[in-house]
Image: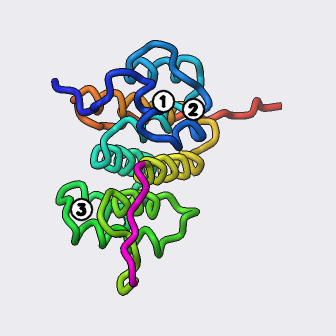
Amino acid sequence: MAQRIRFTTAAQVFEAFPRAAFDIGSRPVDEGPIEFVRTLIARAHRYDAVTYAAYLLPKREAVWWGCQCLRAFSPAYADEALMAAEAWVRTPDETTRRAALALGASGNRRFPTPWLAMAAGHSGGDIAPDGARFPARPGVDTTAISVKAGVIVGLSRTPALEQKDWIVACAEAAIRFAEGGEVKIIPPKPLASVTKPVG
């Protein structure tokens, strides 16, 4: 399988995306990008692993990965904003990008799906509102930032005792996807219900 990423060292991601240094507390030593994600998981820097994955994957792949994370968390996330982001992934043209941008800009950012729509909308082109006098261009890292935000907001809404396992599931899916495989999120096993002893 051909890898989907353009980076050969983990440090190159930080060089390409200046904001990553503010979002990720850990730093690679001398390792490849996939190995660095595994290191972050192993060292329990799990939010760093998810954040790094958002920067590591190309824009379309990052948006698709984020959408699939949200779909795995809850069927309730299959809303208009999420479907607009997925439509852009399938057909990455100006029509789908602008539609996703509009839904992302008008959505409630306390909910995860507008972030994914915004990530698609900020993938390139003009991001100024319709009718603006001057065009505006997205930053080099705004898609990654929005994907990361959407996934983390979605994670924050999962049951507290399951969040660690969900983070690992998303990070491992990003690894498989980066390596050329499918981006299937394997949900963690539900925790057994705890019953109080009688008496």
Q: CA distance from mark 2 to mark 3?
A: 30 Å
How packed mark 3 is, by other alpha carbons closer than 10 Å (few <14, some 14-19, many 20 or more), is: many
Above/below status of 40 relative to 134: above
The residue depicted at 60 percent of the width and 40 percent of the height is 22
Residue 100 location in percent, x, y? Answer: 33, 67
**Residue that sits furthest to the right in the current view:** 199
Mark 2 belongs to which amino acid?
Answer: Lys
Residue 80 location in percent, x, y? Answer: 35, 69
Q: Which residues are magenta?
A: 133-140
Mark 1 belongs to which amino acid?
Answer: Val
Looking at the rendered structure, the number of numbered marks drawn on it comes to: 3
Label 1: which secondary element: helix
**Residue that sits furthest to the bottom in the current view:** 131
Here the colouring is rainbow
Above/below status of 124 relative to 59: below
Please tell me which residue lies in front, 119 or 74. 119
How packed mark 1 is, by other alpha carbons closer than 10 Å (few <14, some 14-19, many 20 or more), is: many
Residue underneath mark 3:
87
